[in-house]
Image (cartoon, coloured by chain):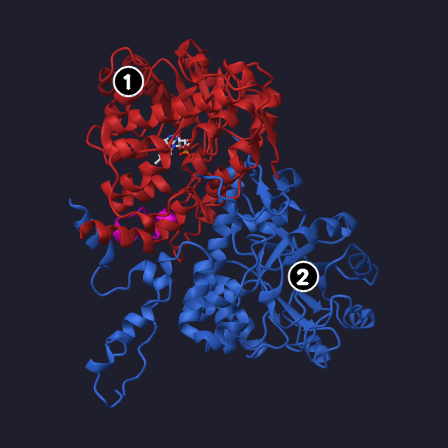
Chain colours: A blue, B red
């Protein structure tokens, strides 16, 4: 075959589909718009604007996506730049400083990722995290999220700012639900009253519901945490812990778990990953309560690193929203299953057949990479 | 016209990004395909190779597991090691880097790594590669078990050359014995058992499935059978996740010649390899094809060399593109290095002559840097000749 034949082959997608590369790059919409003349030269267009409905975005078939980050572009296609903004972004700088140390010839065919958290058995330590007002991103909001999480056998945390009634969400779920509420929120009483079917309550500290960002130095209002602990018989988990001192205080207040998280409302895209905050917290309270974590978990390797630092569970935020926005419940299931499979794959390749075998010997932390040199010439 | 179009395609594609990490001359500046006589570095072969083979074949050669963090890190790690000339330079003619590796006389500490399916690269395939390596100062070649040419046929291609056989563990010991018989009867004396790449997934290759790329098994969702257990529950293929050291013991008994374990990245595994009868190990992350977010092979080499402490030879691969890279690996404890992708570029770009030229180019580059550092013999290339800033 001559090179030009090859070039033609590579340039021309199979009839009727966007090429994968175009669609992933978001070129799909331009291709579709071309059908109504938008991409034609001005001289060739009729003077009267065509009145045709905007074509539906051309999404990559979900089964073709190869990693979780690819869902983000699909969500952008569906939602458009303004609506997608709150769920964009990922920090890779911290995870890129951490490598895994695989061990060979350790059989992992009986791989087991199950774990127990707050009395429930979980299929894997991957949990769908709390995010407010999910109807912003999909017409079926939290109900579709619950359906997708359940299909992937993952627990889900329901935000007190949910856009759908808890009863409807609970009906869609077959996996444990945890409820999340902001400390100091006027809704605390209502949430606890409705907590019936939930398995735990997460109280988010150092944050306001959708409000302005609170400085990291702001003190946690522990009396608000006390109110939640006293107001429920469910295990209470404090989310928003970044230091061992705060974790210790949480334990002293009767809290049954913490989520290491630096999200304080506002723009999540500006935050760095939390992987390096885990170990100090685990060293301080890890033998008393489970330490969970969230913040920029995008790959199974990211999750495996968190577990190696001692985390017992990882909450997934933006990626499941990408899945929800682009493909509804199927997308949520797809994102969660992809992360489960990746976690399993890397546990297998590292010779870690169970979560008990995942420990700090698996990870090395490196200095930030120097700016790319060009020692190639 | 065709060439210009091809250059444009290459410049605009994500492949250019993958290539840019190693290419001192951006593809976008190429205006014509270079000839064999114009090859100045190993990097020059890659765009020619790209132009000659089908895209899925190129992708299969180029890519690595997951996000390709490990693939990139393999190259970056060579930047973290500086060569320090501690002795006065000597003329290249005074450099003799010959050695003996498990009974094989080597003029240079350079080996052709086992890489699969070479006929899609060039009609001469594995036989051509073996002819090229034999012509390049009798360079030892390791033949992949996934060869597109039978072992006996390859070995007949270059009488007097040395061919060893690589294979992946087969759970069934009878099948294992049968494979060993085939390799050893064909004349492959050394056997390489590759113990990594148990569950790898090339995302970037998958992206080209419209053009015939591979589709990963177990990625489909929504069809979860109720009775699945173990690894299968998490949709991973269990075919290669059973490996044990006991299996290595069994293979050891079947192999009459040297047994080499490929894919060691941990000092403790190096010790275990010796304990279980390996005659050599290859410190390798499969050229970034086994596991994303693993270490570069180079950064773990010093600790492994310390653990092995000279008891068995250490071979090294992953990311080698030039003579200075080889020098650094030797200085950090390797007794020899294996070339994977570069040899495929050579064969795919210019056939047998290209593969031979590629191997000889790296041999000569190594001699040149050794001469510049005043290293007349292999043992002169050691820890004192490099400064490491591994991060
Ligand atoms: C296309 C390709 C196919 C490979 N096939 C095999 C194989 O069949 N068996 C094996 O042990 N290693 C295989 N490898 C890994 C190589 O032996 C070697 O570890 C790696 O290519 C070295 O890194 P480099 O490509 O940066 O030189 C393959 C590598 C490539 C690039």
User: Taking the image as four quarters, which one is ligand 1 found in?
Assistant: top left
Q: Residue tagged by mark 2? A: A261
Quadrant for the C terminus of chain A in the image: top left
Whether residue B312 is visible here, answered yes or no, is no
Residue for badge 1? B135
Q: State the predominant SS element of the stretch in magenta.
A: loop
Q: Is residue B168 above or below residue B17?
A: above
Asked whether, in this view, residue B312 is left or right of residue B232, the answer is right
Percent x, y of residue A108: 51, 37
In the rendered image of this protein, does residue B176 appear above or below residue B290?
Answer: above
B206 part of magenta stretch: yes
Q: Position of residue A181 (x, y in %)?
A: 68, 73
Nearest the camera: B298 or B225?
B298
User: SS class of the residue under badge 1?
Assistant: helix
Q: Residue furthest bottom?
A: A48
Element assignment for label 2: loop
């Amino acid at each position: 075959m001559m090179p030009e034949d090859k070039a033609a082959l590579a340039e021309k997608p199979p009839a009727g589909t966007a090429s994968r590369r175009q669609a992933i790059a978001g070129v799909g919409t331009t291709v579709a718009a071309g059908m109504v003349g938008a991409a034609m030269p001005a001289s060739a267009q009729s003077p009267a604007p065509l009145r045709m409905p905007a074509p539906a975005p051309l999404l990559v078939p979900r089964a073709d996506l190869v990693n979780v980050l690819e869902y983000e572009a699909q969500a952008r296609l569906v939602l458009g730049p303004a609506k997608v903004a709150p769920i964009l972004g990922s920090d890779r700088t911290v995870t890129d400083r951490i490598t895994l140390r695989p061990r060979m010839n350790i059989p992992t065919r009986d791989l087991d990722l199950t774990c127990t958290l707050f009395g429930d058995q979980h299929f894997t330590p991957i949990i769908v995290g709390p995010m407010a007002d999910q109807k912003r991103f999909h017409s079926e909001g939290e109900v579709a999220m619950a359906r997708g999480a359940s299909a992937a056998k993952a627990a889900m945390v329901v935000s007190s700012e949910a856009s759908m009634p808890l009863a409807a969400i609970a009906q869609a779920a077959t996996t444990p639900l945890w409820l999340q509420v902001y400390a100091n929120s006027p809704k605390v009483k209502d949430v606890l009253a409705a907590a019936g079917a939930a398995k735990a309550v997460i109280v988010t500290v150092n944050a306001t519901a959708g409000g302005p960002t609170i400085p990291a130095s702001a003190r946690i209002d522990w009396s608000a945490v006390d109110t939640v602990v006293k107001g429920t018989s469910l295990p209470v988990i404090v989310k928003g812990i970044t230091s061992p001192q705060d974790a210790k205080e949480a334990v002293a207040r009767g809290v049954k778990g913490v989520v290491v998280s630096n999200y304080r409302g506002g723009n999540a895209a500006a935050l760095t990953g939390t992987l390096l905050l885990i170990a100090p917290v685990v060293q301080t309270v890890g033998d008393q309560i489970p330490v969970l974590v969230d913040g920029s978990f995008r790959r199974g390797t990211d999750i495996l690193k968190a577990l190696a630092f001692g985390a017992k569970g990882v909450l997934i935020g933006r990626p499941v929203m990408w899945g929800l926005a682009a493909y509804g419940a199927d997308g949520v299931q797809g994102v969660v299953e992809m992360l489960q499979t990746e976690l399993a794959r890397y546990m297998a390749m590292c010779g870690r057949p169970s979560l008990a075998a995942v420990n700090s010997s698996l990870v090395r932390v490196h200095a930030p990479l120097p700016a790319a040199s060009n020692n190639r010439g | 016209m065709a060439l210009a179009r091809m250059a444009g395609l290459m410049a605009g594609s994500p492949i250019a990004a993958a290539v840019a990490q190693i290419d001192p001359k951006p593809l976008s500046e190429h205006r014509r395909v270079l000839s064999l006589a114009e090859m100045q570095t190993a990097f020059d072969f890659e765009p020619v190779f790209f132009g000659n083979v089908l895209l899925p074949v190129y992708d299969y050669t180029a890519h690595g597991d997951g996000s390709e963090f490990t693939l990139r890190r393999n190259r970056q790690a060579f930047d973290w090691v500086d060569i320090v000339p501690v002795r006065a330079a000597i003329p290249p003619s005074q450099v003799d880097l010959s050695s003996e590796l498990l009974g094989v006389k080597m003029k240079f500490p350079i080996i052709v790594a086992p890489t699969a399916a070479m006929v899609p690269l060039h009609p001469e395939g594995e036989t051509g590669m073996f002819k090229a390596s034999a012509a390049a100062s009798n360079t030892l070649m390791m033949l992949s078990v996934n060869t597109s040419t039978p072992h006996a046929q390859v070995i007949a291609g270059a009488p007097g050359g040395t061919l060893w056989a690589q294979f992946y563990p087969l759970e069934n010991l009878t099948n294992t014995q049968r494979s060993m018989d085939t390799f050893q009867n064909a004349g492959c004396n050394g056997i390489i058992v590759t113990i990594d790449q148990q569950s790898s997934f090339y995302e970037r290759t998958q992206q080209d499935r419209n053009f015939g790329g591979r589709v990963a098994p177990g990625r489909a969702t929504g069809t979860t059978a109720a009775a699945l257990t173990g690894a299968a529950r998490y949709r991973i293929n269990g075919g290669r996740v059973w490996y044990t050291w006991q299996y290595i013991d069994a293979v050891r008994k079947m192999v009459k010649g040297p047994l080499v374990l490929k894919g060691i990245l941990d000092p403790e595994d190096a010790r275990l390899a010796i304990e279980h009868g390996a005659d050599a190990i290859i410190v390798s992350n499969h050229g970034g094809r086994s596991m994303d977010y693993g270490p570069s092979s180079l950064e773990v080499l010093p600790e492994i060399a310390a653990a092995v402490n000279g008891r068995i030879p250490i071979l090294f691969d992953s990311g080698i593109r030039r003579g200075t890279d080889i020098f650094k690996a030797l200085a950090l404890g390797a007794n020899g290095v294996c070339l994977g992708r570069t040899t495929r570029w050579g064969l795919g770009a210019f056939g047998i002559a290209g593969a031979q030229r590629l191997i000889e180019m790296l041999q000569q580059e190594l001699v040149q840097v050794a001469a510049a550092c005043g290293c007349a013999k292999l043992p002169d290339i050691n820890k004192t000749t490099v400064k490491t800033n591994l991060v």
